Amino acid sequence: MTEFNKIFTIAINPDKYLYLQETLLEQSLQVTEAPSYLFDGKSKRDAWVSQNIDWLIDPEDKPLKKPDIAGLGATVFCVPEKVAELLKPGLQSGCEFLPMNLNGEPWFSLNIVGTENAINENLTEWNMRRGKISRIRRFNKLVLSKDKIRNNGLFRVENAGLLTFTTDAEGSLYSIVQQYKLKGLNFNEVEAV
């Protein structure tokens, strides 16, 4: 495990950059024939079939830029082949690079495999609504335990919902984005002990 100092949540920047979507043909094939491609922390490598994707463009919106790292929906990150080659050395221990096709150009979706049990229960403040944890905003204050994180390049945390995390470790998504000035993502630091 590589040393790190900071942990970040990762989000797509929808105000500046385009999203990806499955093509209409791909969506109809999945409804009628193909298995559902749910990114749920389980390996997809053995059953994966390359998917066709395209930019989600709304003619009524202002023109948005094409990012280096794009969102397929809000929680799956996709990258072109040249960016995948930069990311693989640091991320492949906890992430699968699944092939996609963007108008004949090879792209890859990043399937984060497994989760980290890293919420510091003593310092985290849960956002409670009617005696239950809120499904929309789970935390008033989220604190993660650094020593519980094994795959620090790109990971999800148990009980943290759909949040995706990275660290400032060498080879992490954050460090590679900073090093190569890749566009498309926002990083927000999370408290860590």
Image (tube, rainbow, N blue to C red):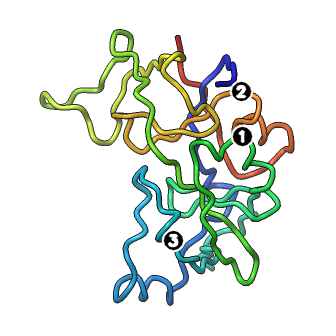
Name the residue at 23% across, 32% down: 133
| Residue corresponding to mark 2 | 169
Secondary element under disc 3, as helix, strand or loop, is loop
Q: Dot 1, crowdedness within 10 Å: few (<14), some or many (≥20)?
A: many
Q: CA distance from mark 3 to mark 1?
A: 22 Å
**What amino acid type should be assigned to the residue bearing mark 2?**
Ala
**What amino acid type should be assigned to the residue bearing mark 3?**
Trp
Pair 3/2: label in front = 3
Q: Dot 3, crowdedness within 10 Å: few (<14), some or many (≥20)?
A: few
Name the residue at 73% across, 73% down: 106
Q: CA distance from mark 1 to mark 2?
A: 9 Å
Name the residue at 37% across, 87% down: 33
Secondary element under disc 1, as helix, strand or loop, is helix
Depicted 66 relative to depicted 57: above or below: above
In the image, residue 144 lies at what x, y percent?
Answer: 47, 20
Depicted 67 relative to depicted 164: above or below: below
Q: State which tag comes first along the sequence, 3 or 1.
A: 3
| Residue corresponding to mark 3 | 48
| Residue corresponding to mark 1 | 90
Depicted 93 relative to depicted 65: above or below: above
Quarter of the figure with the N terminus: top right
Pair 1/2: label in front = 1
Q: State which tag comes first along the sequence, 3 or 2.
A: 3
Name the residue at 53% across, 77% down: 49
Q: Return the residue nearer the eye: 152 or 138.
A: 152
In the image, residue 80 lies at what x, y percent?
Answer: 75, 64
In the drawing, does residue 106 fall left or right of residue 128? right
